[in-house]
Amino acid sequence: MKKTTKPPATVDEYINAAPEVAQSYLKQMRKLIKASAPKADESVSYGMAAYKYLGKPLVYFAGYEQHIGFYATPTGHEAFKKDLSVYNTGKGSVQFPLNEKLPVKLIERIVKFRLKENEVNAVVKKK
């Protein structure tokens, strides 16, 4: 992240403060998430672009010099473990390198999986 006087308050501010090399990827990631989850609430949380659906975390993303970090909680990553195995991953994170195209269809599938998961959890919580 570029040095700023205050942390970004919006996703636009976050993207503009990110390393320049990552900004077009971040814009693409944002567009993918918003298209896949149009009712999700967008914010900045934990210093990253964040999306919530039905009041619960959906996905996050962050820009770095070498990669885009994508965080779909451990369940989102576990469900797509095989697909994500070609990337550097952690318990609830994956790194998409900036020298490759974003895996658009995979990201869409993960976001939609997380949407369904949040919907199911919301129904269960109501009962």
Image: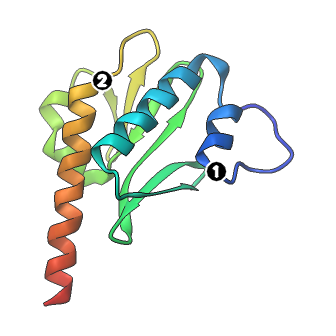
**The N terminus lies in which quarter of the figure?**
top right
If you read the primary sequence from the N terminus, does the residue marked by circle 1 or circle 2 appear first?
1
Give the image location of residue 63, x and y in percent.
55, 31
Residue 23 makes an appearance in the image: yes
Viewer-nearest residue: 69 or 33: 33
- Mark 1: amino acid: Thr
- Where residue 79 sits, quadrant-wise, is top left
In the picture, the disc for residue 87 is 2
Q: Name the residue at 32% across, 70% down.
A: 54
Q: How many marks?
A: 2
Q: Is residue 32 above or below residue 6?
A: above
Q: How is the image coloured?
A: rainbow
Q: Residue at x 31, y 50 (%)?
A: 37
Q: Is residue 18 left or right of residue 94?
A: right
Q: Residues within 10 Å of mark 2 (few under 14, many from 20)?
A: few
**Which is more toward the observer, 54 or 94?**
54
* Relative image position of residue 41 (x, y in whole percent): 44, 60
Q: Which residue is mark 1?
A: 10
